[in-house]
Image (cartoon, rainbow, N blue to C red):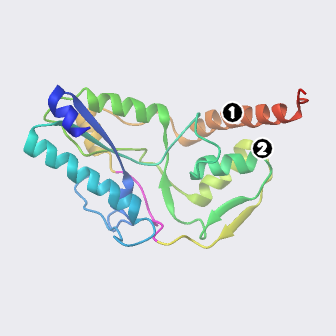
Amino acid sequence: MLGLAKRTGAKILQASTSEVYGDPAMHPQNECYWGNVNPIGVRSCYDEGKRCAETLFFDYHRQNDVKIKVMRIFNTYGPRMHPEDGRVVSNFIVQALQGEEITIYGDGSQTRSFCYVDDLIEGLIRLMDTPDEVTGPINIGNPHEFTILDLAEKVVRATGNRSKLSFHPLPSDDPTQRCPDIALARKVLNWEPQIQLEQGLEKTIRYFAALIADARTSKQKPQAG
């Protein structure tokens, strides 16, 4: 892919991730922070894979003049997520809508920031429209920080269901804090998120509610034959 970009002169985007920061010792995380990643932990295949990808992108940029854009994506959510993708927002919404217990790992005090998908796409487009000398990496995410327990309680209230919270052991190397410093995105892209969590959850819950209702209707239809 990088070789093709060189031959055609195209710009190429790497959708990197906030996971390159690992379990950060700096908070919030800015693009100059090198991260705190366990290279042999259970999450390392993803964390180190993304870090290696950034390395390769910048090597091709320096050695072969490939035009690159590197965007570090923080937690993103919204309609069209798969109900079983394992992400915390979709997990909580689907569990609440189905009247199941909300699964929380640890005590729920770990923090995340949640960027609505429309804001993410706007940031992506603006990054791709920058001059060639703007390579990134640039953080794209919502700097408003919530605990996982906050998120669970917001989902329960927004769905109107009375799901109970179920606490389970925290997975190994799970980050305790995750929040982007988006000063660079504000300066270079004139970008910041416009849709805050409550509004985004409302849109996302409507999507999943319709998806679950359709699935139930399909199961109730008599089978031909």
Q: Give the residue at mark 1.
A: 206
Q: The disc labelled 2 sits on which kind of residue? A: Gly
Q: Dot 2, crowdedness within 10 Å: few (<14), some or many (≥20)?
A: few
Q: Give the residue at mark 2.
A: 160
Is 117 left, or right, of 184 in this rendering? right
Can I make out residue 175 in this image?
yes
Determine the residue positioned at 61% across, 60% down.
149
- Which dot marks residue 174? none
On-image quarter of the N terminus: top left
Q: Dot 1, crowdedness within 10 Å: few (<14), some or many (≥20)?
A: few
Magenta span: helix, strand or loop, mainly? loop
On-image quarter of the C terminus: top right
Indicate yes or no whether the magenta region holds residue 176. yes
Q: The disc labelled 1 sits on which kind of residue? A: Arg
Q: Quadrant of residue 49?
A: bottom left
Q: Percent x, y for residue 103? A: 68, 61
Which residues lie in the magenta part?
Answer: 173-180
Nearer the observer, disc 1 or disc 2? 1
Relative to 140, residue 132 above or below = above
Relative to 154, residue 173 above or below = below
Determine the residue positioned at 40% across, 58% down.
46
Tell which of 32 and 196 is nearer to you: 32
Relative to 59, residue 186 above or below = above
Is 216 left, or right, of 34 in this rendering? right
